[in-house]
Image (cartoon, grey):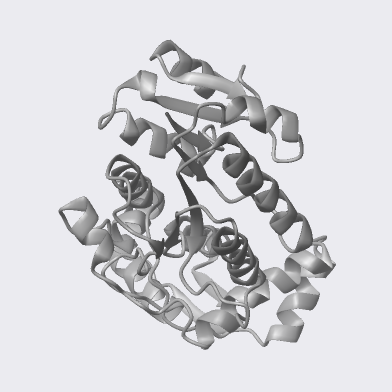
Amino acid sequence: MIIVTGATGKLGRQIVEHLLTRVPADRIGVSVRDPEKPEARAFADQGVRVRRGSFTDAASLAHAFEGASQVLVVSVDKIGEECVKQHRAAIEAAVTAGARRILYTSQMGAGEGSHFQSCRDHAATEEILRESGVPYTSLRNGFYAASAVLFLDRAVESGQIVLPADGPVAWTAHADLAEAAAAILADEGRFEGPTPPLTASRAFTFDDIAGIATELTGRTFTRTTAPDAPFRDQLVGNGVPAESADHLLGIFAAARAGEFSAADPTLAGLLGREPIGLREVLRERLTGA
């Protein structure tokens, strides 16, 4: 039984969909906070075992992970101490359930010295995995291309990309990362410990993105560098919590330090094709094509 947590989320749902093309449905279980969500019910209708599991409820995880051979822990949308605490609970539950391998959706650049809080949280989680005594695979996912699209939201109307100084980032599509995770789950033991960075084939700066957006739309997109402190102040002034603003700035600091610049061939090898490029992702957002 392969258990996938967070299976109604954007990444987890696609992982299960790809896994269904590789292994029988009765070998797949999902751990979700709400089994009544349409996505969860759709999986149940296909023969997937659906059980409630919350990283803040150990008893629910014990039930959701029952009979697990592998557990994929999809990282939670939290930062700092609460994030690591919830990941620890999931890992401990997987160990108690007798899983012979634990997998975890980490991130390229994970390290205790990272400029980005999430990468420090991933590093702390990987340390818990190392100490668990169970074989594990840490999926070092490339930075989600969907985040680049979100950063462009205001620029779609104005043509002005006003963001802090950055560096090259190997923006990577959720769909490709989900397909790769399913392949790794279906081929147990393919990677031991952290994987190489699972990334698209090229890294781009926001200067590059401005150029791509201009080419795709025929409109001029201009990249302007905003100093960190005024940018943060503007975010907070617009109602963004200070902790969230600092977290956001950490992305740019980490990018400037080259933490997300690696463009590795491992993902292409897993997929058997070139990964989806950032140009394709931007084309869909900017032109609907």
Q: Quadrant of residue 224?
A: bottom right
Question: Quick one: 134 or 185, which is closer to the camera?
Answer: 134
Quarter of the image with the N terminus is top left
Q: Quadrant of residue 139?
A: bottom left
- The reply to whether residue 164 is in sight is no
Question: Quick one: 139 or 271, which is closer to the camera?
Answer: 139
Question: Quick one: 155 or 116, which is closer to the camera?
Answer: 116
Q: Which residue appears at 62% of the width and 83% of the height?
A: 113
* x, y percent for residue 99: 50, 40
State whether residue 223 is above or below residue 30: below
Q: Which residue appears at 51% of the width and 34% of the height?
A: 7
Q: How many marks?
A: 0
Extreme residue in the left direction: 272
Q: Which residue appears at 29% of the width and 56% of the height?
A: 280
* x, y percent for residue 45: 43, 11
Is residue 37 shown left or right of residue 159?
right
* x, y percent for residue 191: 33, 59
State whether residue 38 is above or below residue 147: above
- The reply to whether residue 15 is in sight is yes
Q: Quadrant of residue 53?
A: top right
Q: Which residue appears at 23% of the width and 54% of the height?
A: 270
State whether residue 55 is above or below residue 218: above
Extreme residue in the top direction: 45
* x, y percent for residue 286: 39, 54
